[in-house]
Image (cartoon, rainbow, N blue to C red):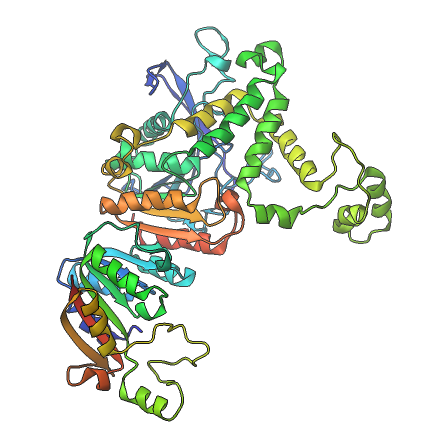
Amino acid sequence: MSDNALIDSIARLVPTGSRVLDLGCGTGEMLAYLVRHRQCTGYGVEIDDTKVHACLQRGVNVLQLNLEDGLSVFEDKSFDVVLQIDTLQHLRNAQTMLLETARVGRIGVVAFPNFAHWPNRLSVLQGRMPVTKRLPYEWYDTPNIRVGTFADFEVLARRNGLRVEQSFGMHEGQEVTFMPNLMASTAVFRFTR
Amino acid sequence: MIVSPQTHRFTEPLQLQSGVMLPAYELMYETYGTLNAQRSNAVLICHALNASHHVAGVHADAQGHVIPRSEGWWDNMIGPGKPLDTNRFFVIGVNNLGSCFGSTGPTHLNPATDEPWGADFPVVTVEDWVNAQARLLDVLGIQQLAAVMGGSLGGMQTLSWTLQYPERVRHAVVVASAPNLTAENIAFNEVARRAIVTDPDFHAGYYLRHDAIPKRGLRIARMIGHITYLSDDVMNDKFGRHLKPLAAQVASAAMQAVDEDDVSTDAAAGRAYQYTTQGVEFQIESYLRHQGDKFAEYFDANTYLLITRALDYFDPARPHGGNLSLALAAAKASFLVVSFTTDWRFSPARSREIVRGLLQNRRDVSYAEIDAPHGHDAFLLDDPRYLQAVRAYFDHKVSI
């Protein structure tokens, strides 16, 4: 997901001039934005050939690595901010990656689809897995293998000793602060250890 | 693109890393494209073990006719409109010292004795080559390179450029390379060297004086090298357990076969083993022997020893207690590092060591790990993901 509103909102969580690591950086849109508008430096990590190529065409630094292999190539606290925008839900070892994120960066920023958004709840109540604009996949072909909610992440963060500094939902290009677990299709967290 | 090589003679002695002074020497090189007025669009190409200054384009004979199959070794990568576009960049290919393709090497005359250098040619290192290349740039009036690029041993020279002359390199493209050789890699080189040195025609390296060439050694050196440049899968796809057709079968099948490409497989299909230990039974044997024969015709044995040794010695982390990160602190360039998943001679893990060292020094680096099937040889082949990655880097990252 790379709509402009999400990019804007997440960019505001990244201090100007930060050294950034963007895990699962896709086509490098977020990173290019941070470089241009917030004077950041950094690297994207991406596994897909086509997306790596897109990053190179944007002129952003990209490292073709498999996140499932861990972040051993990166030193402790070597980044100001580590981003995981729509990445966590694709990873088998999501909890390990969250801890790795906290190890490598001083600040972590995570965004992922909130499965507790009310239309999803309605769909499940009707006996079917949700298929929406935010979750466009059928249950049998979805790459989202870690299905979590806004509220679930708060619990996971607390359990792993991560301090949530800021959190909000996103829906239809708007930040959602009122009952985000119900009202937002995307969950956004900024945390430190 | 018809190109012709040029030679420059250097009369100022070159101090080599070994302590030896090379009194005077020639470097053979080619250039492609045009150096711009600011002299800011030059890209240097560093070659690997058995390549030369002839990187791109074709050669023509005295009448101006293109010589068939004279394409440069990286002609798929470099030329007008190619990933490294010579319409935009001025590209330089240079043959290294100690080679057998034109630059001063062991087949040339030693001015001190008026005999071929042979085994007396001094041991040259990656660092020595880079120093010699830097002098060529001085001659060409190029203070700073837009980029240096190389694969394998050429990648080591590229890496070394960023450490020896950090101010003279803006970008480094390091393909299928490593920060040093592993024990296994040195071991392969040593087998090749022993094959050459123990050939009775080697004459302690002075074979030219004896009108001899240690072809047997060169063949075996090439055979073992060749095995390590391919992947198991590619070798199996290409040769499998296919038997080499017998001469009589080839002849009779050729008379019947419509499609000549099918002759060899048709002829060998289902033929019985010959139960021979010294004859050629499998196609892979035939292929390796052919590669060895070809190589022994054009490559110099002392050059093979020198270049494999240069590979062995390269280890920029050594003066820093083995700490690559400390070594790379000198680098100022931005990097594109490329590796191939099936390359076991220069594996992705070795490229990731370079990436890691650059990250620790907060250098600009991009890394492409191409899932190509061809092993180490992939860096010379036409994988579109690989060529596109290099193209994108030069188009969007390398300014002139």
Q: Nearer the viewer, residue B17 or A132?
A: A132
Note whether B358 is above or below A83 in the view shown. Answer: above
Answer yes or no: is residue A39 visible.
yes
Q: Position of residue B361 (x, y in %)?
A: 22, 44
Residue B68: x percent and y percent? 62, 39
In front: B115, or A31?
A31
Residue sitting farthest toward the front? A159
Q: How many marks?
A: 0
Horizontal side, residue B291 vs residue B17: left or right: right
Question: What's the residue at 44%, 9% (across, down)?
Answer: B111
Furthest residue in direction bottom, as rendered: A126
Question: Residue B222: where, in percent of width, then height?
Answer: 58, 31
Horizontal relation, residue A183 to residue B63: left or right: left
Whether residue B86 is visible here, answered yes or no, is no
Quadrant of residue B38 within the rendered picture: top left
Quarter holding residue B346: top left
Residue drawn at 42 percent across, 46 percent down: B348
Q: Nearer the viewer, residue A150 or B111?
A: A150
| Residue at the outermost top position | B113
Residue B114 drawn above or below residue A63: above
Q: Which residue does the image show at 55% across and 45% down from the upper left?
A: B231
